[in-house]
Image (cartoon, rainbow, N blue to C red):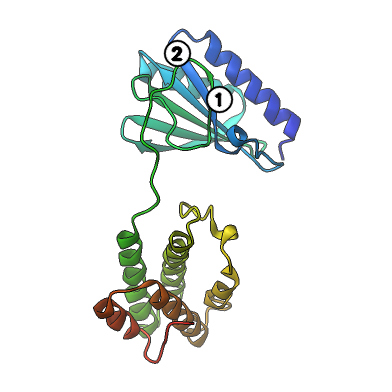
Amino acid sequence: MFSVSEREQLHRDLVNAAEIDPRVVGAAVTGSAALGEEDRWSDIDFALSVDRDLDAVITDWTALMYACDAVGHVDVRRGSVLFRVFLLRSSLQVDVAFWPSTEFGATGPAFRLLFGEANPLPRSAQPDRAELVGLAWLYGLHARSSIARGLVWQAVYMVNGMRDHVMSLRCLAEGVNAVQGRGLDDLADASEFAGTLVLSPQPDEVSRAFHVLTGLLLREITDSGLAQAVRALSPGVAAPR
């Protein structure tokens, strides 16, 4: 397990590496550290503005991270930006974002510029409500068919996916962060979702959790035709008051 002092030292080393790399013209701290909200479990989120040889910079910084005891990484792309997420042997997560300098900037409040210049960028939006609704009922359809077919573990998977989207809808309704569960602990009453947890891989238990979850989805739906179709997924269900 990494220590806070180890994390801080690695962060300083990465900043120093960015400052002496002539291809890197800007850097920023992102995530919780940018907001002054780091805790014992926080990772390192670091963004680089690169003005040339982007592929070479990615290769060289990847080698640097493995020299710092990384044991694996995973890539997430957003347009031309690469977010390379490293796992260190100590279990510390280090996210390094490689931005073309023409696109480098803050897309949200969790951005603190260390050096260089940041472009004005539109802020990242909340998830689309219609898409969340659609994914919730789609998971619900597959949960129902999995239960009917006796595919218990597949049904559990579908119920869990449905819950994620219904909870995100609740976050939107209450005006808290609906991205990746970040606002769930800010909900006024998330405890009512406790009944949607599948407590054992038994068909009756999966059906019970699905029934409760379908009722919670109904609360988030205003379209009468869609609500009628969702209600048919689990007969007898009603939206909680």
- Quadrant holding the N terminus: top right
* Residue 210 point in image, percent of width and height: 45, 79
* Residue 188 point in image, percent of width and height: 58, 66
* Residue 55 point in image, percent of width and height: 36, 20
Looking at the rendering, which quadrant does residue 192 occupy?
bottom right
Looking at the rendering, which quadrant does residue 102 occupy?
top left
Q: Which residue is mark 2?
A: 25
Q: Nearer the viewer, residue 162 or 62?
A: 162
Q: Nearer the viewer, residue 47 or 238?
A: 238
Vertical comparison of 153 with 22: above or below? below
* Residue 98 point in image, percent of width and height: 42, 26
- Frontmost of labels 1 and 2 is 2
- The span from disc 1 to disc 2 (Cα, nearest Å) is 19 Å
- Please, what is the three-letter code of the amino acid marked with disc 1? Met
Q: Secondary structure at mark 2?
A: strand
Vertical comparison of 68 with 134: above or below? above
Q: Nearer the viewer, residue 235 or 151?
A: 235
Left or right of 40 on screen, residue 171: left
Query: Dot 1, crowdedness within 10 Å: few (<14), some or many (≥20)?
Result: many
Q: Residue at x 43, y 22 (%)?
A: 118
Left or right of 120 on screen, residue 11: right
Q: Residue at x 58, y 32 (%)?
A: 34
Left or right of 36 on screen, residue 73: left
Q: Which residue is mark 1?
A: 65
Q: Residue at x 36, y 74 (%)?
A: 140
Residue that extends furthest to the bottom in the rendered view of this protein: 236
Vertical comparison of 198 with 113: above or below? below
- Please, what is the three-letter code of the amino acid marked with disc 2? Val
Vertical comparison of 12 with 164: above or below? above
Query: Dot 2, crowdedness within 10 Å: few (<14), some or many (≥20)?
Result: some
Number of disc labels:
2
